[in-house]
Structure formats: C-alpha cells, structure tokens
Amino acid sequence: NAGVTQTPKFQVLKTGQSMTLQCAQDMNHEYMSWYRQDPGMGLRLIHYSVGAGITDQGEVPNGYNVSRSTTEDFPLRLLSAAPSQTSVYFCASSRPTGTGVVVQTGELFFGEGSRLTVL
Amino acid sequence: AQKITQTQPGMFVQEKEAVTLDCTYDTSDPSYGLFWYKQPSSGEMIFLIYQGSYDQQNATEGRYSLNFQKARKSANLVISASQLGDSAMYFCAIANTDKLIFGTGTRLQVFP
C-alpha cells in the first residue's frame, strides 16, 4: 500500500533557487494539505485543497504556491527559496465525507516528510 | 479562527504509570473534531485518537483515552500503563470542515 508518497525526502537548495516538492496519494482522497514542521512550532498548515481545481491558504502560505490538477497529486512549489523555509515538510490527505472533509473522518494520512535545507 | 494550546513542552513518566497530556482549544465553530497524533523520533505522524464535538462519550483506543471537557474547552490525552515505546512527541489538533490546526506538541519521555 503506497498511501501518501512525498519526493524528494531530502533536498539542499541555495537562496533564490526554485523547487517543487511532490505529493501523490493513491487512496482517492479529495482532501490534501501541506504542513511545515519547525522545532518548537509544531506543524503549521501552508496550503490545502478540498478537491481537484480547488486550493486555499493555510496559516503560513507566503513563499509557497500549490495547484491541484488531479485528485492524486498536490505539488508544493517554492519559487525563490529563503533560509526561513528550511524545515521538514509533510503532505497529508483525508478521505471524503458527506459534509465535512476533515472533521468527520477522524484521521489525516501523512507522508513520510521531506527535509529541506536552504543555504 | 481556531487555536490549540499545549502548555507542557516536556513530560516524564515511569513505565507502567498513567500520564495525562494537556490540550486546550478555542473555536467559534459549533462542529469540530479533536485529534491526537504521535510522532516518534523516526519522524512519521501516527494517528492515535479522535473526538467529535457532538460525541457524548469520551473516545478510547486501547491504552489511549481522550478526556473531553467541552465547557472547559479541553481535550486531554490519557495514556494508561506507559511503555518505553510511548516516548515521542504528541500533538493535539483541532479541525473544522477544511483545516486541521496543530498545537506545538509535548515531548513525553518514559523511563524504566
């Protein structure tokens, strides 16, 4: 069972470079999201999507772009990386429900995380 | 806006003892969900337990129980009979229909 797959697992960038973190899920989940985890800060929501073609901002969206052209994929783009974006990034998905995509499911399925270092 | 607060940065517990990890929340939504996740040193996020805002009874999953006090806006996690493998970061989270917001976490260390 693949679940939620993130690539790459590790990446080192120079300030100003761009890159895309890939996230794919094979569970037909409508809801997908990206978090960053920093020491002492917990997980903070960057962007999320409730279905193909629909995205919205989370708590810390600045410096990141997302798109959702298919149900399976939800890439996170850094257009001009900054040292402040050094972090561990997690992608997560959740199965659909009738009225609430997250609150009624009881669980987010997480990828294994991607560690990004910006020099 | 929703907010989750975990005031205990670190907790110690002896093996086989019970431990309570605190979590308080704030939300204006009448319908919401409360979650606890575990993150061991290997880094993966492991779902532990879920409580819906309209659920009358406290959720339980094996050794984990969620002490839900709606009037006090608290959702504490109780781990009974702690094991060495319970040493990890524990995160409380709150969700409405489209956002799951996490607290800053509590590091639990279980000693023999």
Image (cartoon, helix red, strand yellow):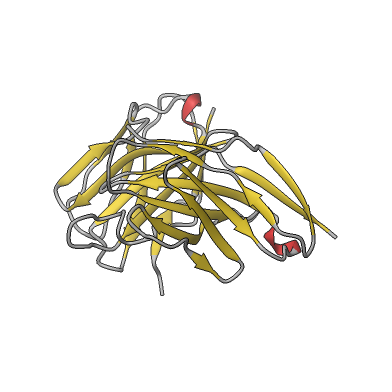
Q: Is residue A74 visible?
A: yes
Residue at x 30%, y 59% (from the top left corner): A104
Residue at the farthest left position: A53
Assign the N terminus of chain B to one quadrant of the image: top left
**Residue B49 coordinates in the image, percent (x, y):** 48, 61
In the picture, measured across the screen, residue B80 lies left or right of residue B76, that is right
Look at the picture and state if B1 lies above or below B101.
above
- Closer to the camera in the image, A82 or A52: A52
In the rendered image of this protein, does residue B59 appear above or below residue B37?
below
Q: Residue at x 31, y 68 (%)?
A: A26
- The x, y position of residue A39, in whole percent, is 59, 35
Of A101 and B45, which appears nearest the observer? A101
Residue under the image location 50 percent in, 25 percent down: A83
The residue that appears at 32% across and 59% down in the rendered structure is A94
> Image quadrant of residue A40?
top right
Taking the image as shown, residue A6 lies to the left or right of residue A26, namely right
Examine the rendered structure and indicate whether residue B55 appears above or below residue B20. below
Instruction: Looking at the picture, tell me which residue is in the foreground, B103 or B52.
Output: B52
